[in-house]
């Protein structure tokens, strides 16, 4: 009812007026087509609706999917459909879409938060007066698409990120959130959350339905408006803007019951607990922290995700990295991720493509037995890539390290040997059943008489799915039926065609040809003007006498020009029946394979997520190397709860820190050294870099505790238990709060959640109230944080804070530097010791276009009131620094030293030929290049390096160690021709080559050299010399661009050890 009241389209508003809420469909039985008598379609739809009353019902009726009543109104409003019959006021609301547009309609509805129940017709012949049987074929939910019939299709289905049902409750430890994924049949719980952390999770989680537990109503205000006063207001404001339901009882078991009711699941359905303990795990990021560093994309804030991964990395790996940033891992997992990334950074072998399959998609397709041959090939790619990693020592070590991060991501604990054994079993099982690339024993039937398009359309829906050995009988029967059809068409129509071609009649003579009637799935004769009397005694007369008008499936005449014969129709029927049996057998085998793999679902989910993580980390390392980021030294924070001043080992040191949104490789950033052993009180001018420094430190610390590379030259980062960043606050009219109220609420949450193991970063504290009291509040907050003993920075323009009698023994003063040059004070954006009392307010206002008269008057007023506080120096011709360098504890920065046998689906013959070519090319490349290097370094053999060629297979890519390295490569094209090139971006070059038509499976050989100049020399040398060795190059002309390497020296004298 509520959603109907919110409808805005004029057509929907008119339809809503015709609803009657006395039944679930909303039908007014007094209107036209509104009858609910037993046996009618409306009555049948009402029976289906009663099973899933919370879902929109769409029912297959011929070539359309229809909805009536309330559901029709929602289709018009949210799916952009027009009502059937226009807006006639005497008829019930009806709307629908053609069969071909069903998925688009479902996407529109689920995108708006609706679930849809789909009713299908039983296909096949029925009696003329009998109604077709119907059944519920499936459901579409937000984050869980409709998959019925996918097993028989030859294309993929986009599968969105699954959307959980969320339950929120309150416990003694704090707020608790329970997430239930119906698709995966899993649930997880997280307790002890702060209000801000919980709201962050709600903002970043696209959920299907929200349930609030009655425990949230228990508060000091004693009102059911539990968020009306004090704590809970932020959460209440978040929830009231969304649709939610209350529930009582056990926060977990009763929530699962609600989920079963919501999805219409049987009470016996089991949900698996995938909760991973949060002990020793940092607190999730607060909403303010996540938005201010771009972990959650926010307008005007540099996006952290975009700089962590290369632009070509998208989908599941990005989601994994985002979730890791929002929910930092425990120290052990972070250390494992960092160790994995370090190994990835040094890998020299080629790496797999890392096929990313959505675990939710995998589970749903196997559970509903709707996985098609494409999905099985993708699953095989997943397990084969895991097995491929075990065959290489470098990749095998990485694979073992990825086990624990995958456990945390999936909640599945699987040992290494089990993973490998189950992947081998799965690969073998799919290999036994599925028709794979490279196999060629299932060609489409062909004929010189029957149009090939006919056979293509009829047989492509089942051939090339499973191996021929499993459908030998059906395959043979289709072949025999195709031959019989060809013979029937030849005997019935060819004599007529032959006679027509031999006739040289004037305009108006007979015409005819054998054509494929695609709409009717038939091969018929199409002709004009045939009279047996005219053809008496000639070839074709008897065949013309046998012609009869062609009929469609409903027995109606197709047209005046289409003809067939009884013999051809019998042959067509036989062919279609044979094809239908073959297709049914193929679908049966595919569904059987889904049933077999269901027992391995957990392993497949684990393997698919492992590859997602591997791709995410490899991509991050590649981008980090390109940006010249480093791996920090990650230290485990002490577990003691006692408040003590932090020692140097517990501090954070960032040398050469740059803003994460700048590309250091392009030299556009101002670097800073941050040595943080306690709380720092930071001052500096407007535009001096305070906010950028805080964001940079926050991002570096977060990346460090997640195991990622950081934008610095070297770094020592403790594993904080929480990282909290507070930037400038704005008012919230919806909540009736001023900007200062919002700031105090957020800082209250920060202080209450801070421990000695926390990192607290507060920008321009207490800026929203009057100066005197704001200064005192800021001073008190600094004292509190100092007493706790956390690391952090509090920046301020309230210089009166330095005159307060603060009891802050561990707090040090830092400033953003300024210099006085040529009569102007300018920021250096460098962090220095001391206090900076210059705000550059007048300069900033002038730079932003404030009228000169206003600036001059402001300077006069300032001079008249604060003249005694103005620092000397504006008349001094020498370069002066405006900042003083005093510190309460004599603290200054110090520098940190920088740390420096898998199965193949192709035939064995093709594999052998490819391997031989690769070996021959590798031998020739090594001979040619090694000889050149001997010539170049004959006077300095210490610099001579051995050429080591690394192969990149058809489904592999270069390792991150090639990023920025000068590489010479040879592309082995599928047509056995070669292409020679050199690059500093091998991964990008390989991707560019494979993006071209026919090059998707091209292999490569590459080796690295010192410097681009040498790479260019060797490239030209190979282009000019490889053809002399009998190789066919596609870019021979490129060798004429340079002068070296053009001589055709004989290489016969060069001895090569084999």
Image (tube, helix red, strand yellow):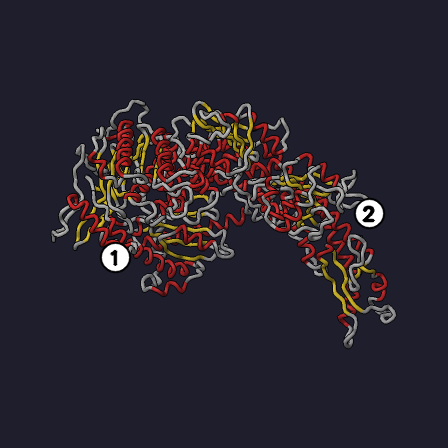
Depth check, front residue: 301 or 665: 301
Residue 379 vs residue 487: left or right? left
Residue 468 vs residue 212: left or right? right
Q: How crowded is mark 1: few (under 14 residues within 10 Å), some or many (20 or more)?
A: few
Residue 277 vs residue 849: left or right? right
Mark 2 or 1: in front is 1
Depth check, front residue: 550 or 842: 842
- According to the picture, the residue beneath numbered tag 1 turns out to be 852
Task: Find out whether the residues at labels 2 and 1 contact each other: C-beta distance under 8 Å.
Answer: no
Q: Distance between the residues labelled 2 and 1?
A: 89 Å
Q: Name the element at disc 2.
A: loop
Q: Name the element at disc 1.
A: helix
Q: In which quarter of the image is residue 209?
A: top right
Q: In which quarter of the image is residue 723?
A: top left
Q: In which quarter of the image is residue 352?
A: top left
Coordinates of residue 523 in the picture (x, y in percent): 74, 58
Screen quadrant of the N terminus = top right
- Does any portion of residue 286 appear in the rendered image? yes
Residue 579: assigned label: none
Depth check, front residue: 123 or 966: 123
Residue found 33% across the figure and 58% down from its top? 1016
Q: Which of marks 2 and 1 is nearer the N terminus?
A: 2
Depth check, front residue: 391 or 347: 347
The residue most toward the bottom is 506
Coordinates of residue 560 in the picture (x, y in percent): 80, 64
Eyeballing the image, is 642 above or below 383?
Answer: above
Residue 128: assigned label: 2
Q: Residues within 10 Å of mark 2 (few under 14, many from 20)?
A: few
Residue found 35% across the figure and 62% down from its top? 1048
Coordinates of residue 37 in the picture (x, y in percent): 78, 39
Coordinates of residue 466 in the picture (x, y in percent): 63, 43
- Does any portion of residue 383 appear in the rendered image? no
């Amino acid at each position: 009812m509520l959603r109907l009241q919110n409808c805005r389209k004029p057509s929907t508003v008119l339809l809503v007026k015709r609803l009657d809420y006395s039944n679930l469909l909303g039908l007014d039985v007094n209107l036209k087509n509104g009858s609910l008598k037993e046996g009618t379609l409306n009555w049948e739809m009402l029976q289906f609706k009663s099973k899933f009353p919370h879902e929109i019902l769409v029912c297959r009726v011929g070539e359309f999917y229809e909805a009536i009543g309330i559901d029709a109104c929602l289709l018009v409003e949210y799916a952009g459909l027009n009502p059937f019959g226009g807006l006639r006021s005497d008829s019930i609301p009806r709307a629908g879409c053609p069969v071909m547009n069903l998925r688009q309609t479902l996407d529109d509805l689920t995108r708006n938060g609706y679930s849809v129940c789909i009713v299908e017709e039983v296909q096949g012949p029925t009696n003329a007066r009998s109604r077709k049987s119907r059944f519920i074929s499936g459901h579409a939910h937000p984050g869980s698409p409709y998959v019925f019939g996918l097993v028989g299709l030859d294309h993929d289905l986009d599968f969105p990120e699954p959307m959980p049902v969320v339950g929120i409750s309150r416990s003694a430890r704090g707020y608790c959130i329970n997430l239930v994924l119906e698709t995966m049949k899993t649930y997880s719980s997280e307790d002890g959350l702060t209000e801000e952390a919980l709201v962050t999770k709600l903002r970043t989680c696209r959920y299907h339905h929200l349930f609030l537990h009655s425990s949230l109503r228990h508060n000091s205000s004693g009102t059911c408006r539990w968020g009306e006063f004090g704590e809970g207001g932020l959460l209440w404001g978040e929830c009231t803007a969304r649709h939610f339901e209350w529930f009582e009882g056990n926060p977990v078991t009763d929530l699962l019951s609600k989920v079963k009711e919501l999805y219409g699941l049987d009470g016996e359905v089991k949900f698996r607990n995938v909760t991973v303990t949060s002990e020793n795990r940092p607190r999730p990021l607060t909403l303010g922290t996540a938005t201010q560093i771009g972990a959650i994309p926010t307008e005007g804030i540099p996006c952290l995700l975009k700089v962590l991964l290369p632009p070509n990395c998208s989908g599941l790996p990005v989601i994994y990295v985002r979730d890791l940033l929002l929910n930092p891992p425990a120290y052990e997992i972070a250390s494992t991720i960092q160790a994995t990334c370090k190994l990835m950074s040094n890998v020299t072998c080629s790496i797999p493509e890392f096929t990313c399959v959505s675990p939710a998609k995998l589970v749903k397709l196997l559970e509903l037995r709707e996985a098609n041959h494409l999905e099985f090939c993708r699953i095989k790619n997943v397990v084969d890539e895991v097995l491929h990693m075990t065959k290489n020592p470098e990749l095998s070590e990485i694979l073992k390290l990825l086990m624990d991060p995958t456990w945390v991501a999936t909640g599945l604990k699987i040992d290494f040997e089990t993973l490998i054994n189950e992947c081998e079993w799965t690969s073998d099982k799919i290999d036994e059943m599925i028709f794979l690339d490279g196999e060629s024993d299932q060609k489409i039937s062909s004929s010189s008489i029957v149009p090939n398009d006919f056979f293509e359309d009829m047989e492509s829906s089942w051939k090339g799915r499973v191996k021929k050995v499993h459908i030998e009988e059906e395959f043979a029967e289709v072949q025999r039926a195709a031959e019989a059809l060809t013979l029937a068409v030849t005997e019935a129509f060819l004599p007529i065609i032959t006679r027509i071609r031999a006739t040289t009649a004037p305009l108006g003579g007979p015409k005819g040809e054998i054509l494929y009637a695609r709409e009717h799935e038939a091969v018929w004769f199409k002709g004009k003007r045939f009279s047996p009397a005219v053809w008496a005694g000639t070839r074709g007369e008897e065949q013309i006498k046998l012609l009869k008008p062609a009929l469609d499936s409903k027995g109606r005449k197709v047209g005046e020009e289409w003809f067939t014969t009884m013999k051809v129709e019998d042959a067509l029927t036989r062919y279609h029946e044979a094809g239908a049996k073959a297709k049914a057998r193929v679908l049966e085998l595919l569904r059987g394979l889904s049933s077999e793999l269901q027992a391995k679902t957990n392993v497949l989910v684990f393997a698919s997520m492992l590859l997602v993580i591997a791709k995410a980390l490899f991509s991050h390392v590649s981008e980090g190397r390109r940006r010249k980021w480093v791996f920090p030294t990650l230290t485990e924070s002490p577990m003691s709860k006692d408040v003590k001043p932090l020692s140097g080992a517990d501090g954070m040191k960032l040398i050469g820190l740059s803003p994460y949104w700048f590309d250091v490789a392009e030299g556009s950033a101002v670097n800073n050294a941050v040595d943080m052993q306690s709380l720092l009180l930071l001052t500096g001018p407007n535009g001096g870099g305070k906010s950028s420094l805080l964001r940079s430190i926050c991002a570096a610390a977060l990346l460090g505790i997640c195991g990622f590379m950081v934008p610095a030259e070297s770094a020592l980062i403790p594993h904080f238990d929480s990282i909290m960043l507070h930037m400038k606050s704005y008012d919230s009219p919806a909540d009736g709060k001023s900007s200062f109220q919002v700031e105090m609420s957020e800082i209250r949450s920060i202080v209450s959640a801070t421990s000695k193991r926390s990192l607290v970063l507060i920008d321009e504290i207490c800026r929203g109230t009057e100066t005197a009291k704001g200064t005192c509040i800021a001073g008190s907050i600094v004292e509190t944080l100092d007493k706790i003993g956390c690391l952090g920075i509090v920046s301020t323009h309230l210089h009166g804070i330095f005159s307060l009698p603060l009891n802050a023994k561990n707090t040090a003063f830092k400033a953003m530097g300024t210099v006085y040059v040529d009569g102007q004070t300018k920021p250096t954006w460098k962090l220095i010791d001391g206090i900076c009392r210059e705000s550059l307010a007048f300069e900033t206002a002038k730079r932003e276009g404030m009228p000169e008269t206003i600036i001059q008057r402001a300077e006069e007023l300032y001079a008249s009131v604060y003249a005694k506080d103005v620092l000397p120096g504006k008349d001094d011709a020498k370069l002066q620094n405006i900042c003083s360098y005093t510190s309460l504890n004599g603290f200054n920065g110090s520098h940190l030293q920088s740390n420096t046998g898998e199965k193949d689906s192709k035939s064995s013959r093709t594999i052998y030929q490819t391997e031989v070519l690769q070996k021959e090319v590798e031998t020739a490349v090594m001979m040619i290049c090694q000889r050149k290097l001997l010539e170049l370094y004959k006077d300095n053999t210490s610099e001579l390096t051995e050429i080591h060629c690394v192969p990149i297979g058809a489904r592999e890519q270069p390792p991150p160690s090639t990023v920025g390295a000068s590489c010479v490569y040879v592309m082995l094209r599928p047509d056995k021709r070669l292409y020679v090139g050199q690059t500093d971006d091998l991964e990008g070059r390989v991707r560019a080559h494979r993006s071209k038509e026919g090059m998707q499976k091209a292999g490569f050989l590459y080796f690295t050299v010192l410097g681009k100049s040498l790479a260019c020399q060797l490239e030209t040398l190979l282009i000019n010399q490889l053809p002399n060795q009998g190789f066919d190059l596609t870019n021979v002309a490129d060798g004429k661009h340079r002068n070296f390497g053009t001589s055709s020296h004989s290489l016969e004298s060069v001895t090569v050890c084999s």
